[in-house]
Amino acid sequence: MHADNLKLGVNIDHIAVLREARKINDPDPLMALGICAQNGADQITIHLREDRRHIHDEDARRIIAASPLPVNLECSIDPEIIRIVTRLRPHRATLVPEKREEVTTEGGLDVIGKYDMILNAIKMLREAQIEVSLFIDPTHEAIEASERLGAEWVELHTGSYANIYAMRYSALPHSHHAIPELHLSRKELDNRLEMAYSDIVDAANAARSAGMKVAAGHGLNYHNVSAIVSIETIEELNIGQSIIARSVFTGLASAVSEMKALCRR
Ligand code: PXP
């Protein structure tokens, strides 16, 4: 099926990251809701991390109550967090793997190893009438397990694609973290980029054929997003870091509307 209208979910966690740098009330992520909605966003995405390093429970509560757009709440599969999410009642819960020491969500859910725990989380969320998405690596094994788990959505992790894209095309070092493949030739990077991209295409098509809705996200920015937009079986992108980073210079309104323009098919 062709998903004509690619939806843009804006992840506003980074506004709370800035607030937490000072542990004060400013900037308030709630202020982003209207600006995102007026500038083409289709969804607000937030992550209630177990360590509450950016979005707090009270933020989630206020955002869900006030948002003119559906709220997609990312969370771990820990039963205590799932219980909190069932009380918060977002429109959708996206289950993500979580490690305390990570800077950001580094890989997809272990849908095979954690199958029973995920099944339990899905059951609890269903009972609370919350739509469920699984954040997974773009592999056939993960798609098959997600289908067996009965997920309505999968969100494909685009981090590998984004990292290789940055190594291939960015004039600036992409990250402060060591990138082990930095010595790779352009040809090797081209090959790896093609492989990472075709994994996403294949996974999106397989998930769609299995009857699931397909989102994608992580590491997407104003340069690397167009190739992902062209994958017709993907119907939604969730993008945070690059939009909030640009908004520091241009304002949130234009950062969102420029990304939305790139999402048009
Ligand atoms: N989707 C999921 C499931 C995520 O965990 C994140 C990061 O919080 C994003 C999308 C957005 O990633 P980025 O901030 O790199 O755009």
Image: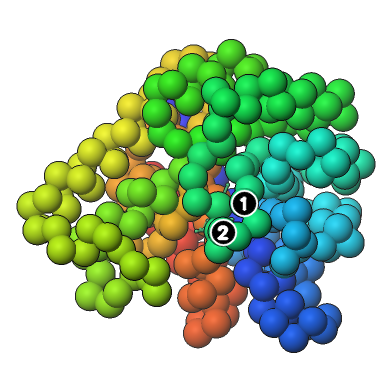
Q: Viewer-proximal residue, 220 or 144?
A: 144
How many residues crowd around disc 1 within 10 Å: few (fewer than 14), some, or many (20 or more)? some
Classify residue 225 by image quadrant: bottom left
Q: Is residue 190 above or below residue 102?
A: above
Are the two marked residues, 1 and 2, in contact with CB atoms closer than 8 angstroms? yes
Relative image position of residue 7 (x, y in whole percent): 54, 45
Give, as a three-letter code, the residue at label 2. Glu
- Residue at 66% of width from left, 38% of height from top? 95
Judged left or right of residue 259, residue 149 is: right
Q: Quadrant of ligand 1?
A: bottom right
Relative image position of residue 168 (x, y in whole percent): 20, 61
Q: Which mark is residue 99?
A: 1
Q: Circle 1 sits in a helix, a strand or a loop, which is it?
A: loop
Return the residue at label 2: 102
- Residue at 42% of width from left, 56% of height from top? 220
Q: Quadrant of the C terminus?
A: top left
Classify residue 151 by image quadrant: top right
Give, as a three-letter code, the residue at label 1. Lys
Q: Viewer-proximal residue, 74 or 225?
A: 74
Q: Circle 2 sits in a helix, a strand or a loop, which is it?
A: loop
Relative image position of residue 240 (x, y in whole percent): 55, 61
| CB of mark 1 near ligand 1 (< 8 Å) | no
Quick one: which residue is furthest to the right in this view? 87
Q: Is residue 63 above or below residue 211?
A: below
